[in-house]
Image: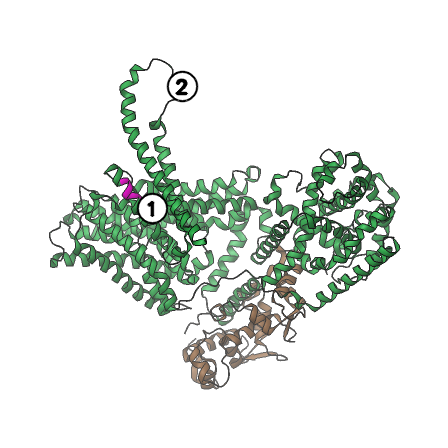
Chain colours: A green, B brown
Amino acid sequence: MLRRGRRKTWLLGTFLCLVLVSGVEAGAKSEHSHGGHQQQNASEITGIPIVKFKWHHVEMPYTVALWVLVAGVCKLVIEANHHVTTVIPESALLICFGFILGGIVWGADKVQTFSLTPTVFFFYLLPQIILDAGYFMPNKLFFSNLGGILIHAVIGTCWNAATVGLSLWGCHMGGAMGDIDIGLLQYLLFGSLLAAVDPVAVIAVFEEVHVNEVLFIMVFGESLLNDGVTVVLFNVFDAFVSLGGGAIDAAEIVKGIVSFFVVAFGGALVGVIFGILLSLLTRCTKNIQIIEPGFVFVLGYLSYLTAEMLSLSAILSITFCGVCCQKYINANMDEKSVTTVRYVMKVFANGSETMIFVFLGISAIDKTIWVWNTGFILLTLLFVFVYRFIGVFALTWIQNKFRLVPLDFTDRIIMSYGGLRGAVAYGLAVLLDPNKIKERPLMIGTTLIVVYFTVILQGITMKPLVTWLKVKRAALSEIMLIEKVQNKVFDHMLVAIEDISGQKGHNYMRDKWKNFEGKWLSWILMKPSARKKHDYVFNVFHKLNLKDALDYVAEGECKGSLEFVRNETAYIDFKKKFGDDFSDISMPEIGIDMGDTTIANPYARRDTVPSVSLEMHEQTMNGLRESEDINTHHLLQQHLYKGRKQHRHRYSRSHFDVNQDEDEVQEIFQRTMRNRLESFKSAKMGVAPPKTITKHPKKDTQQKMPNGKSTDKTRSYHSGDEDFEFSEGDSASGYTGSFPRVTYTAGASHLQSNPVRSLFQLVLRTGLHARPGPHGPGADPALAGRGGAGQRHRRPVAESPGRTALDPSNLRRLAPLRISTRSSDSFTLAGVDPAASSRDRDDLPPPPSPPPTYKPN
Amino acid sequence: MGSNKSTIQYIPDVKELIEETGFSAAHIQRLFERFDLLDRDQMGTLRVEDFEAIPELAMNPIGDRIIGAFFSSGKETVDFPTFVRVLAHFQPTDSNRTKNSSQEPYNSPNRKLQFAFQLYDQDRDGKISRAELLQVLQEMLGMQVTDEQLQSIAERAIQEADLDGDDAISFDEFKKSLEKVDIDQKMRIGFLS
């Protein structure tokens, strides 16, 4: 069934493609005739046409958009067939799809209307891929291997160009290729355009193999940085070809070498300047957060164009722009903007990568570029392949003498084998001047064959080869805090040992740079607020917390609403019983965390969950949106409770053993038993449990709360009633409607609602305050007063084991993040608490003082 | 530098040292020169002050711990063999030597980990307690993070690694938590010869 389903998808996709393409074709054709027709009849139009078919009006953008769609659909179809993509890499499949599409176009037009032009490729498709590469570049890895990467990018590429060109020329002289008109310089030009390893192809193929990071960065870094070399070589040889062999003297060669440095370093410099500009710009985009991500793309693109304008290496420029700014813009921009940038970056990069491969395929179906010369083509393939191996092995052999972690034999094989050529080579080949180079079609064709050979054949065999050679793979692991801490310790340790043993090595340099960066660059390029929490370990911690919070909400949402009722009461009970103990800390924290993190989640559309608790309160005050509020509250509450269960579950999935912590288990057990006991008691006597609850021994030694005192005060404080009164004003309809349990009387449901809502207000309002919530315990008397209803509420307590995940030690670590940022807010808010201000003024708890309540030390 | 003292012949027990640590003679010579340079009062031993005089080390957040690692418990000074032995932890792991020597060489992953572990475990009770971890964190993160945040980072880190629930990280747990890290590569520096 599944297979059939898949096949169906596949067929459907193919069909869709065909329809689209034929649609384009038909459109294009009809446009021809139609356009002509219109022109002829232009004078004959007498009346006002109601509907006009204006294909020519939209032709260009329409075609582009359609092609984007087609490429996207191709990818969709390919990815729908997972069993295929595990064997054949996506890039190869895309090229094959390109063949088919090209065949269709060819069949329809008898001419290849569409092909990858250098302009489109270099200006519209390539920049975003490279920007993406630079922006996501693992900087530390990149710079610590920079030496090796540069050796390969510069010397390796020159070696490739020279040897391929010279060898082909040698074979030509030897008569292996028959009668073709290519001189030495043209061979060298051809060699130079084939020399460069292509970043797009490398990313596409290596992304699926997951080789170890050093190996990846060596190949990938090389593919990025060799662009400078390729551009120079190509330009120099192009100029030489124009000049002719006789005009080349030493001066020209020296100029060529100088231009290499200018092009490469100039390109990088332009990139760095734009990176700095971008960092500075994002420092002050606080008020226009919505378009903040746009700057990243615009300035990145501008750096590319600027370098191109100055005839410097554009790829280097945009790479370095991304590499330089990533840290600062991530710190400067809002978290949401950073997420946007990341995703948009991926959308662009992935999209244009798809386009490039599809068009590489399409471009092949063109009779005009195919001039077959077996000798030339096969020899080129052979030389490209062999010289890559020789070059890599020679260079790594030299490098290994200096490398701390030498590249072993298998690494070197994969590096050689990963020398994929791609669209850059093709783009350059198309740029060749047909007037100067008579065999241009042959060169383009050969380049395409080399590209197909490397991308398809080497791409397919890469994975088996990696497996067969047992190349070290990248460790796929979840981030662990301890690991990150330890990495940091390692860094410091190595620096210290280098200092002690008197070596001024790599770590020493990195440390110096870090100091400099921390002292000056961060100061200039980073917002003051961002600078503070700019620490690696802390960031990891923050990310882990966010992830937990998100998981928590997402998993809570999976639960149905039937269980919800139980939760709600359970929640109240929970609150009542343990509020005094610990939930003052753990609950509100969680609440706030949720409130914040869920904004990106389904709650985003609910404007009634404001991230600022003041608004929330005002809204509850005016009572108009009460029911909606309550709904929101209930949803939120549901997650607050349900999630915990899941939360705990999550831990068991990710290595942390659930029941390992004996103390925790013990504590949970005790609580559960106590709960049961109390619910039993209350059911029997018809009274809500007495105040003894507040006198639980403090379980958590971490929280040194002045419990007794504050709870006593809040106890006599009837905020529960207060809330009750004012929610009566609006009808119970909205409220009961949202409840599955309709058997309650209106009063009962109100009763139910009040504590719940007030708890929520507490959660959202008091934030992390350790202030033992006035509402929570306050709800008690209200419940007790209502006797029977109160009892009913109590019952579900027996189900409390489910709540065990509420254990504060699980949740507390989410807390301190917020503590520091929120405490002042909630402080003031608590001050204007209407319930507090309207009633029992004498009994008001003293202005909550956060410090004493949460003092971990 | 060319003084007679720093030539290799004058280093006591140099052969055994080479055998034991896996450094080459050239390495030893170079390290001896360094040792000599650090040893300002020419006592043939290093004191804590000698280490502290290295300016870069003073800026290292965990510099004190590293210095402490050179001093075996109770001793006030470090002699040259000890100095070399500690540094030997940072040599690349050599799988050949592991086999033929009876004692586990300093540069084995296990020994390296032990070295890292004892940087935390200042009271040498075989466990990284929460307080010890917190101290390291404090030193490394410093002013950027508040105390509460440090607390919870420490707590989370402990929770992650703590398998037996004693609220501390034993060496085995430490080892397990760093399973995926290539210790050999992380604790390796290029000794110039």
Q: Chain of mark 1?
A: A
Residue type (three-letter) at the residue carrying disc 2? Ile
Q: From the viewer's perspective, is A307 left or right of B169?
A: left
Question: In the structure shown, which secondary structural element does the residue marked by tag 1 occupy?
Answer: helix
Q: Is residue A798 above or below residue A617?
A: below
How far from the left and from the top, in percent, is residue A736?
Answer: 74, 40
Q: Residues within 10 Å of mark 2 (few under 14, many from 20)?
A: few
Residue nearer the viewer, A213 or A616: A616
Q: Residues within 10 Å of mark 1 (few under 14, many from 20)?
A: many
How far from the left and from the top, in percent, is residue B23?
Answer: 44, 78
Q: From the viewer's perspective, is A448 left or right of B24?
A: left
Using the rendered image of the protein, determine whether residue B18 is visible from the camera's viewpoint. Answer: no
Looking at the rendered structure, which numbered label has been put on residue A50? Answer: 2
> Which residues fall within the magenta stretch?
A101-105
Quarter of the image that includes the C terminus of chain B: bottom left
Q: Please report the residue visible at 29 percent of the width from the left and 41 percent of the height from the top.
A: A104
Which residue is under mark 1?
A358
Quarter of the image that includes the N terminus of chain B: bottom left
Query: Do callouts 1 and 2 mark residues in contact (Cβ within 8 Å)?
Result: no
Question: Going from the N terminus, do you reach mark 1 or mark 2 first?
Answer: 2
Disc 1 versus disc 2: nearer the observer: 2
Residue type (three-letter) at the residue carrying disc 1? Val
| The furthest residue to the front | A1
How far from the left and from the top, in percent, is residue B123?
Answer: 66, 74
Residue nearer the viewer, A616 or A493: A616
Magenta stretch contains residue A501: no
